[in-house]
Amino acid sequence: MKKVLVISYFYPPCTLTAAQRTGAWVKYLEAYNWQPVVVTRCWPNAIHGPMDALRPCGNDIRFSREGKAEVFRLPYRPSFRDRYVVRHANRPWRVLSRLLTLWQMVCDHWLSPVGVMKDLQVQADKVIANDPDISAVIISGNPFEQFRIGYRLHRKHGIPWIADYRDDWNTSELEEAKTLTGRLLRMITSVNEKLWVGTASFITSVSPWYVEKIQQFTGVKGEVVLNGYDELPEMDNDHPPISPTEFIITYNGTLYESQDVETVLDVVKSLIDQTGDKLKIVIHFPGLAYDSVAENRVRKNMRGYEDHVVITDRIPRLKVLEIQQQSDVLLMIAHGGVKGVPSSKVFEYIGLRKPVLLYPNDHDILESLLTETNLGVICNNREQLENSMKEMILSKVRGEANTTRPDKAVIAGLSRKQQVEKLVHLLNRL
């Protein structure tokens, strides 16, 4: 059995979505004759807010065998910048915070890495030096500064590596640099992205559009490895209990500025006014309180309708799955004016085989996935959104059965295990 070193800042037991991708890879790689060796950082078992990820964790390197996987969890020692951010979270001196962020960036890009980036690099180097059976490396970003580790390992050991992008970096349309300083920094980090990733054998990413952009930018051939969904027993339920007196809509995931949740909420309020005497409409946002800005955005819009919105802190994943199972429809809000952004939650929705309401139509990967799986209710504008939701509500009032007919064969091909097979195909070519 060949060995592959997986370097990932995010990894279980981290409960953030970013950890699920590499966690699934390690779970399934051994089925394809690859033994994973993981280098990651220590994570607390519970993360309730962004500051929790920046607090100290662990005192020494923890090694464990998990199945056939070997996992090194490094103590997380916050940098001075991270300690400052945590200490002054409620009243930061923004100028100093930005200067510290800039200095940390200078170190991670051009000088000696600091904090966790240095620790990951040192440990990865030791693992490769001490284990001649390791024949490949996969590094999953972000943080994209991890790609510097791949660059250095390749130069020192000649080992082939794959740069995995959960998001895109300097090609991102979601994180466009709007200030002069931001544009200057992007110009500089673009040079390093091309330099570091230029030594990779392949790049992988989560959508065809991302792969096309990144491989054109870096000159490295790319392949799509979708996030996929976990095949959990809790998801395998074609007839979950659903409230007969409520129409439940659930949006699970991060809410970005580029997502037009306001139009959705306006439609929900309109339908409450129109059909509230027939069925109570409730929209759920599990975990949204993790981001106070997003939470306030929703609460502000739903003033006067507080009884129809449920927002929670981060809750256990199985509880979130239960909420989604008991929903009448799952909500997917595409990013306005940006294509190729497949929220990882769309795969969880697909794995649940529930109807998915997409607004607005992204005319790209979300439309494609939801059309191929036969789960999508796709709306191009507010009128279509309101008409579609109203018809679903009235259909439930009339006692009509859900007419969604999922394409189970297509859905099966979108599981994380099937996506790992694509990753293995690349590993076997190194």
Image (cartoon, grey):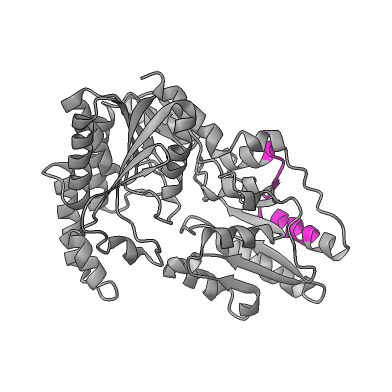
Q: In this view of the protein, which residue sits in the foreground, 77 or 207?
A: 77
Q: Position of residue 63 (x, y in %)?
A: 28, 46
Q: Residue at x 23, y 35 (%)?
A: 127
Q: In this view of the protein, which residue sits in the foreground, 152 or 302?
A: 152
Q: In this view of the protein, which residue sits in the foreground, 115 or 282?
A: 115
Query: What is the quadrant of the C terminus in the image?
Result: top left
Q: Position of residue 388 (x, y in %)?
A: 75, 55
Q: Residue at x 62, y 37 (%)?
A: 368
- Residue 184 shows in the view: no
Does residue 128 appear left or right of residue 264 in this picture? left
Does residue 62 appear left or right of residue 45 in this picture? left
Q: Residue at x 48, y 27 (%)?
A: 32
Q: Residue at x 82, y 73 (%)?
A: 278
Q: Quadrant of residue 429?
A: top left
- The segment highlighted magenta reads 371-392
Relative to residue 205, is residue 107 depicted above or below?
below
Q: Position of residue 301 (x, y in %)?
A: 56, 72
Relative to residue 411, is residue 16 depicted above or below?
below
Q: Quadrant of residue 55?
A: bottom left
Query: What is the quadrant of the N terminus in the image?
Result: top left
Extreme residue in the bottom direction: 304
- Residue 289 shows in the view: yes
Q: Quadrant of residue 382?
A: bottom right
Decide whether residue 386 is among the magenta residues: yes
Q: Position of residue 203 (x, y in %)?
A: 38, 30
